[in-house]
Structure formats: structure tokens, C-alpha cells
Amino acid sequence: PGVQAPSATINLLALARGEGLLIDPARTLHVARIMTVALESSFDIAQVSEKASHDRPLSINFTNLSALLMGAGISYDSAEGRAVAGLV
């Protein structure tokens, strides 16, 4: 049987900023690091071989990208919206 990857979702609206940047890069990195530690600690290492324990699959997803863009007045079906999504 395969090993399932632990996953978490980060709400982009919780990282929203005021003027200028849509999200705070330092806060985003901090949240991603905390989520990585939390996901790694939830991993059942007994299910995994020694080799696979060095390459554990983790999944961190984002939600509310369209709400973040709309709140900033950016159409999510535009070049600017796609550029912001690519940066996230």
C-alpha cells in the first residue's frame, strides 16, 4: 500500500496586506515553514522505508486566491491575475 501525503491548506486572505503587496512574503514563508513542521510531525514514519523517510511527500495548498485578487481589484482571468497566482 502507498503512503498518503499529509496535507494542509493555507488561507491567502489571512495573509492579505494593505497597500502595495497583496500578501506579506515574510508571513507567507513563516506560515509555510510552520505547516511543514506540523505535517512532518504527523507523518507515520513506521509506514515508510528508510529511503522514503528522507523524501517524505507533503502537500501544502492555498485557498481564496480569487477572493484575494478580487479584493485588490484584479481580475483573476487577466494577465495580472495570472502573474500574481504564479508568484504565490
Image (spheres, rainbow, N blue to C red):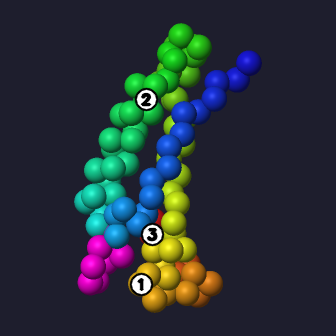
Q: Secondary structure at mark 1?
A: loop
Label 2: which secondary element? helix
Report which residue position mark 3 lands on: 87
Disc 3 crowd rating (10 Å Cα; few below 14, some 14-19, many 20+) is few
Q: Earlier in the sequence, mark 2 or mark 1?
A: 2
Q: Amino acid at mark 1?
A: Ala
The question of residue 19 being in magenta is answered with yes
Which residue appears at 63% of the width and 29% of the height?
Answer: 4
Q: Which residue is mark 1?
A: 72
Q: Say which residue label 2 marks.
A: 40
Q: In this view, which residue lies farthest toward the right?
A: 1
- State yes or no: residue 64 in magenta: no
State left or right for residue 22 relative to residue 2. left
Q: Position of residue 35 (x, y in %)?
A: 39, 41
Q: Which residues are magenta?
A: 17-23
Amino acid on which disc 2 is placed: Glu
The residue positioned 33% from the left and 50% from the top of the image is 31
**In 3D space, how far apart are the residues under numbered discs 2 and 1 (Cα atoms)?**
34 Å
**Which of the labelled discs sits on residue 4, or is there none?**
none
Q: Please report the residue visible at 50 percent of the width from the left and 43 percent of the height from the top.
A: 8
Which quarter of the picture shows residue 18?
Answer: bottom left
Q: In the image, what residue type sits under mark 3?
A: Leu
Q: Is residue 21 left or right of residue 43?
A: left
Q: Secondary structure at mark 3?
A: helix
Q: Are marks 3 and 1 in contact (CB under 8 Å)?
A: no
Nearest to viewer (mark 2 / mark 3): 2
All told, the count of numbered labels is: 3
- In this view, the residue farthest toward the top is 46
Q: CA distance from mark 2 to mark 3?
A: 25 Å
